[in-house]
Image (tube, grey):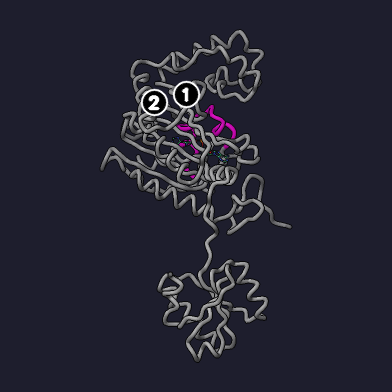
Amino acid sequence: MKYKLPPGVFDIIPNDPKEKWRSSYLWQYVEKTIREVTRLYGYHEIRTPLFEKTDLFTRSVGESSDIVSKEMYTFIDKGERSLTLRPEGTAPIMRAVVENGLTNQSTVQKLFTIGPMFRYERSQAGRYRQHHQLSVESVGYSSPEQDAELIDMIHTLYKRLGIKKMMIQLNSIGTPKNREKYRTALQQYLQKNIDSLSEDSQKRFHTNPLRILDSKSPNDQQLLEGAPSILDHLDEESNKHFTKVQELLKQLEIPFTINEKLVRGLDYYNHTVFEITAEELGAHNTIGAGGRYDGLIKALGGADLPAVGFATGLERVIQTLLNQQAELPPPTTSSLFLVPLGDAARQYCFTLLHQLRQQNISCEMDFSGRKLGKVMHYADQIDTKYTAVFGDDELTSKQIKLKNMETGESTTVSIEDLARTLNA
Ligand code: HAM
């Protein structure tokens, strides 16, 4: 084949029997559930462009982050501007909040978006160069209830979708001041073993030592075993906030574990951070993650407002549902497939379909005029509930014989009663 997709991207097709997660009916199911849950929690949709000026991400996600330093799809447009395909949703949403003056009307803004994100990552199962996120962001509340509500929301969404086995990991990374102190303590601790650290961690030692905690190298992890904990470096306020978030989660009986090594790879976070991993997903098993980012709106030129949010990767969510054998809806199908025989029947059926659709009945007809066997084979494939052959007899009697494709049974109904029968 001459034209093939570049690595790391994929098509979503109506029904893929081999890679089921690429089936659009499953994406629709997830998106529908997302819309139900976001509505329950009072969040409203926002849609921002797929590209932004590059410095939005450099400024917010951070120069030393993997996303900015290695993974952005950046290009110069014909007007000599540096633009970047959005690698994540938080910075664009906050840019839009400021640019549209949304907080002038109310300082509280509860927003979500669903859409593609772009990162030049090593492409492999669960990691794509175009992936899709639900990004949920709440502006204006600094209280721990807002952190806990978002964790409750993502947990509720996963449960409603059918994810059974997941783990919520929670941490607090405090204020920038707390982190400065912790950074020094961590560097002091690692200094003696700096030469034994992995190459990546050695680089991070000076630029972003907290990210060493995230290292996948078993040797790094061993060296970190006795490392100081960020939780011992939180000030009283941060500690209070973190304790309250935990109390609220316990109050709602949401299970979580504290992971004091969880720091997140984006620079804008403070206080609460969390990640949710799913069982049976393989190496890239983080399905959702988020945290508080109180300084970001101000850094982007807006008011000094607190904010907290999360994002979840839809590919990984659908793959988890399939791997955990969740109960999922079947592909959508039509109620009726009509097979007209002859020109007069064809003309009649064309109007009949139009009328049925006005009554919210999904129905189709054959336009090909191929041999009956072939048309019925197609009807079988599209998995319609009923089929009906419509010829001169039906035209005269205004009676139609509906064949139930699942049971094979036939029932004759008058055209007048057709809509009622199909809706039953
Ligand atoms: P993130 O952890 O970079 O956070 O991404 C969120 C989720 O997107 C991940 O947990 C994962 O499920 C999915 N994801 C990320 N990269 C890929 C990829 N290459 N392929 C497949 N899935 C991927 C953020 O983006 C933050 N904006 C989250 C946030 C919102 N924090 C506060 N508000």
Per the image, is 67 magenta? yes
For the image shown, how many numbered marks are present on the structure?
A: 2
Q: Earlier in the sequence, mark 1 or mark 2?
A: 2
Give whichever of 153, 311 is nearer the camera: 153
Q: Considering the numbered disc 2 on the image, is that residue within a helix, a strand or a loop?
A: helix
Look at mark 1 in the image and give the residue it sits on: 258
Residue type at numbered disc 2: Gln
Per the image, is 62 magenta? yes
Check the image and report above or below for 101 versus 172: below
**Where's residue 59, x and y in %?**
46, 32
Check the image and report above or below for 253 versus 403: above
Q: Determine which quarter of the picture holds residue 24.
A: bottom right
Magenta span of residues = 51-71
**Where's residue 50, x and y in %?**
49, 47
Q: Is the distance from the Cβ of mark 1 to the nearest ligand 1 atom less than 8 Å?
A: no
Residue type at numbered disc 1: Ile
Q: Badge 1: how crowded within 10 Å, few (<14), some, or many (20+)?
A: few
Q: Badge 2: how crowded within 10 Å, few (<14), some, or many (20+)?
A: many
**Where's residue 171, x and y in %?**
45, 24
Query: Which label belongs to residue 146?
Result: none
C-alpha gap between disc 1 and disc 2: 9 Å
**Where's residue 315, x and y in %?**
56, 45
Which residue is drawn at the image coordinates 59% and 67% (left, top)? Answer: 382
Q: Main secondary structure of the magenta part?
A: helix
Query: Which label belongs to residue 246?
Result: 2
Give whichever of 420, 139 is nearer the camera: 420
Q: Considering the numbered disc 1 on the image, is that residue within a helix, a strand or a loop?
A: strand
Give whichever of 114, 164 is nearer the camera: 164
Which residue is drawn at the image coordinates 58% and 14% (left, top)? Answer: 225
Which residue is drawn at the image coordinates 58% and 66% (left, top)? Answer: 383
